[in-house]
Image: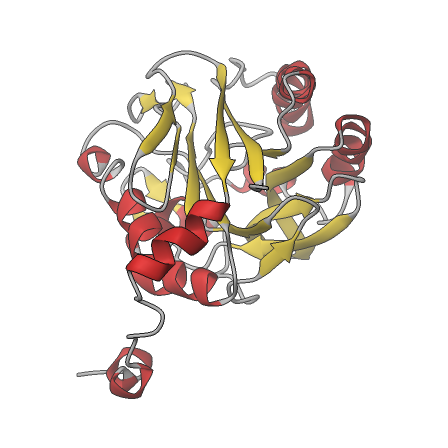
Amino acid sequence: MGRTVKGGLIQSSNPPFDDKMTVAEIQKAALDKHLPMIEEAGSKGVQILCLQEIFNGPYFCPAQEQRWYDAAEACPGPTTEILAPLARKHQMVIVVPIYEREQAGVYYNTAAVLDADGKYLGKYRKNHIPHTSGFWEKYYFKPGNLGYPVFQTRYAKVGVYICYDRHFPEGARLLGLHGAEIVFNPSATVAGLSQYLWKLEQPAHAVANGYFMGCINRVGTEAPWNIGKFYGTSYFVDPRGNFLSIGSEDKDEIITADLDLEMIEEVRRVWQFYRDRRPDTYEDMVRQLP
């Protein structure tokens, strides 16, 4: 009998806010917007759900402002505690991307993984941190220090790769080597320079590594920065590179797909990339070159 899992992705615009609101109030508005969508995903039978990058607030990295450090929280912490009962209620794994505070002045771009019984399984910290106009992430985040973990959930082995990570095939391969069956990439990316890569890189990762990917992008524009339109088009892709479902460019919505995990074995028996790897020839990839 096949192992079919129903996956879900939530793409959402961020509620508008003004300078009179505290960071906590801004985050509460975003969380409150997501809660009914998470409930809806559960009612639709979604078994593994992933939210967008730093889902409980705006993408604040276009400016370098200390006030947004207030958005960081412990992980596990308040947000995972709020979502754990929903995971239990719907028997649904939830990938929860947040801004993590490890200690004073030490912050990470993180995704927690809650199992279908609400149990906290662990977290991934974004490893590749961009720093360029509109995306001043090094001001807010340290590079991840937890490697590329894979989490054995009730339904599948799940890995996480966050936004800019997707431009680096090395981590995508390591997630496969660690046993990932589904890799989620929560993102916040706007129309422009990298848009043409959105539907190229991640299907390529899925094919090269023989796993499913769920790729999430928020929608709308976010004042006061207005760096561009977050263009949505969240999607699931299978190990053959086929798009299973694709979201719109401008709507808050839940994207779902049935993921037949038996396909992983089938595809890897044809394309023996793991058998034919030559790690003994890859030394230059893990040392500094001139």
Residue lying at 33% horizontally and 80% vertically, measured from the top left: 286
Residue 28: name its quadrant.
top right
Q: In this image, 288 relative to 188: left or right?
A: left
Q: Position of residue 159 (x, y in %)?
A: 53, 52
Residue lying at 39% horizontally and 52% vertically, measured from the top left: 266
Residue 224: name its quadrant.
top left
Residue lying at 29% horizontally and 86% vertically, measured from the top left: 283
Q: Position of residue 9 (x, y in %)?
A: 51, 28
In the current view of this chain or complex, which residue is farthest to the front? 1
User: Which of 187 and 273 lies nearest the eye of the viewer?
Assistant: 273
Q: Residue 138: in sight, yes or no?
A: no
Q: In this image, 177 relative to 199: left or right?
A: right
Q: Position of residue 200 (x, y in %)?
A: 22, 41
With respect to residue 220, does 161 lie above or below? Answer: below
User: Which of 49 and 4 lies nearest the eye of the viewer?
Assistant: 4
Q: Residue 80: in sight, yes or no?
A: yes
